[in-house]
Image (cartoon, helix red, strand yellow):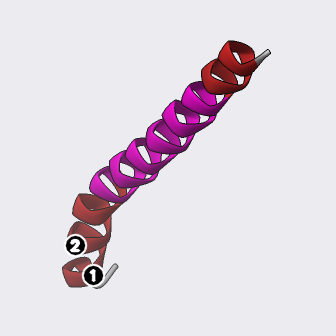
Amino acid sequence: MQTELAAAQRRAERAEAEAVLARLLLVELRLPREREGAGGGG
């Protein structure tokens, strides 16, 4: 039972880390577009 709990904990920690990386990637992808759009003026 303890090994199952440890495995679940590792999966949860990995999922959290993947979520953080996904957020960082979204920010990286968004920033260049915002920079381009800010100076365009339409």
Question: Which secondary structure is most common in the magenta stretch?
Answer: helix
User: Where is residue 35 shown, x and y percent of the image?
Assistant: 22, 72
29 or 33, nearer to the observer: 29
Question: Badge 1: few (under 14), some or many (20 or more) residues near its Cα, within 10 Å?
Answer: few
Left or right: residue 18 compared with residue 31: right
The verdict on residue 16 being magenta is yes
3 or 40, nearer to the observer: 3
User: Where is residue 31 shown, x and y percent of the image?
Assistant: 28, 64
**Quadrant position of the N terminus in the picture:** top right
- Indicate the amino acid at tag 2: Arg
What residue is disc 2 on?
35
* Contact flag, marks 1 and 2 (Cβ < 8 Å): yes
Look at the picture and state if 17 lies above or below 7: below
**In the rendered structure, which segment of residues is drawn in magenta?**
9-29
User: Where is residue 18 shown, x and y percent of the image?
Assistant: 47, 36
Displayed quadrant of residue 34: bottom left
Query: Circle 2 sits in a helix, a strand or a loop, which is it?
Result: helix
Rendered residue at 28%/85% (across/down): 41
User: Where is residue 12 shown, x and y percent of the image?
Assistant: 63, 35
CA separation in Å, label 1 and label 2? 5 Å
Q: Which mark is residue 38?
A: 1
Look at the picture and state if 29 lies above or below 15: below
Left or right: residue 7 compared with residue 27: right
Query: Circle 1 sits in a helix, a strand or a loop, which is it?
Result: helix
Look at the picture and state if 39 lies above or below 25: below
- Indicate the amino acid at tag 1: Ala
Left or right: residue 18 compared with residue 4: left
